[in-house]
Image: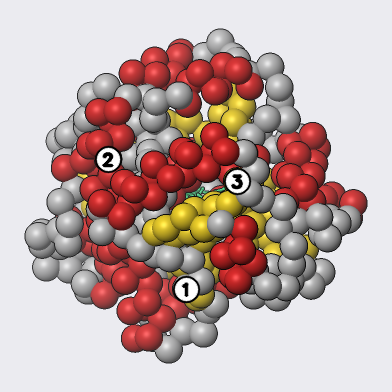
Amino acid sequence: MSKKVLIVGGGIIGICSAYYLLKDGHDVTIIDRYGMDSGASYINAGYLSPGHIIPLASPGVIKQGLKWMFDSSSPFYVQPRINMDFFKWLFAFNKSCSINNVNNSIAPIIDISLLSQNLLKDIKIENKMGFHYDQKGLLMLCKHEKSLEKENEVVRLAVANGLDAKMLNKQEIKKIEPNINVDSIGAAYFGCDHHTTPGELIEALKKFIKQKGVKCFANTEIKDYNIANNKIDSISVSNQILKFDEYILSAGTWTSQICKKLGIDILLQAGKGYSVNSKSDTGISCPAILVEAKCAVTPMNGFTRFSGTMEISSVNNRIRKNRVDAICNSVESFYPSIKVSSSERENARFGFRPISADGVPYIGRTNKLDNVIIATGHGMMGWSMSTGTGKIISEIISNKKTSIDINRFNPNRKF
Ligand SMILES: Cc1cc2nc3c(=O)[nH]c(=O)nc-3n(C[C@H](O)[C@H](O)[C@H](O)COP(=O)(O)OP(=O)(O)OC[C@H]3O[C@@H](n4cnc5c(N)ncnc54)[C@H](O)[C@@H]3O)c2cc1C
């Protein structure tokens, strides 16, 4: 049965949900408070990474965060602040930084990431879309033995879970990167990881869904959600009352504010990150994460992107120059022939990752309101998990069996 569906938030998660709802014959509207042209879904590193099997909430993260807490240029920075939602999240996150959380998350993370990779390839072929999609794998470049040992452990886990991953020495790195000197003692290599150029892909999807009839309203604020009979009955927007059968909350980090209005508990914080584009011919051909600096390097269509830092802070538009410089300086340290110019640094952009309390997304119906579905909390992996999330959302609304088991993503889970 065709339903009238409202998607609140038109980042990559909202757009992919619209794509699959449209395919399943629903009448779809997206409302976005801002321009649908910036933020995490546009400035990310573009990785489709089943190889990122370890959730952010894992042993050692809190210790590292505390160590870096007073260094605002560090790659992982938790801004201390007095805020009840932040305290609740931090308490739950701390509790989730356990081996148990890692063990319970690996299989669901791989399932949704592989599902998403396959779906994106299908979307490209089925619709003859020309967006950039590359399958070169991902290097995890290390400068220190200790980091290599940690990467080796992840490779072992990845291989045990059926993924293509291995360790490389300096000579083997040179074979993958013949055109640039890399200052690293070795690397992990995830052959299972692919990459894209985010702005190109999201624009192609947006154009497609609009042409096929999805109504998109950017720069539009929902003033009120009108509740009746344990459901959202309608919304008030631009002096109109609009009614839908189902409501999907996919407003990224801002989903927590909407949930608060609706009386839905969700533990979510903003993880700010930055990216810098370089048009110079860097010679880099394989995407890489500079492990100690936690910085991502991606050869995209016509430029190379350097991105990184995770700043758990309030949502604000401030660009911290020292953090942008830390990203660029780490690139120059791993690739000594690269110089990131001051104008490239000045044009840095930022986005907020929606960070759940255990590093695993929230996908599914809330038990608070009958016609509300949550789709957020993908953190560092929202690009990798987007098409899978969109498909699952449409399957829930269409009362179909979901493509993968979604128990682990239950938005009502307790911490
Ligand atoms: C530097 C950086 C690098 C990254 N690299 C990768 C990567 O390589 N691979 C990967 O998998 N992930 C990566 N990520 C994470 C990924 O980008 C995010 O997880 C993903 O983009 C989140 O998408 P989203 O649609 O949930 O949220 P967003 O992209 O934030 O979209 C949310 C939308 O909701 C709208 N909105 C806000 N408030 C409201 C409201 N009240 N009502 C209606 N709409 C509203 C916003 O305007 C926005 O358009 C990276 C993130 C960053 C910051």
* Amino acid on which the number 3 mark rests in the picture: Cys
Q: Are marks 1 and 3 in contact (CB under 8 Å)?
A: no
Element at label 3: strand
Residue 366 placed where, x, y %?
22, 37
How many badges with numbers are in the image? Answer: 3
Label 3 CA crowd tier, 10 Å (few <14, some 14–19, many 20+): many
Q: Quarter of the image holding residue 38?
A: bottom right
Residue 243 placed where, x, y %?
29, 53
Q: CA distance from mark 3 to mark 2?
A: 25 Å
Residue 407 placed where, x, y %?
16, 42
Q: Is residue 112 visible?
A: no
Residue identifier under label 3? 142
The disc, 2 or 1, on the residue closer to the chain's N-terminal end is 2
Q: Is residue 248 left or right of residue 199?
A: left
Tell me the number on the disc at residue 135: 1
User: 123 or 245: nearer the eye?
Assistant: 123
Furthest toward the right, the residue is 342
Q: Is residue 281 visible?
A: yes
Q: CA distance from mark 1 to mark 3?
A: 22 Å
Q: Is residue 53 left or right of residue 184?
A: left
Furthest toward the bottom, the residue is 128
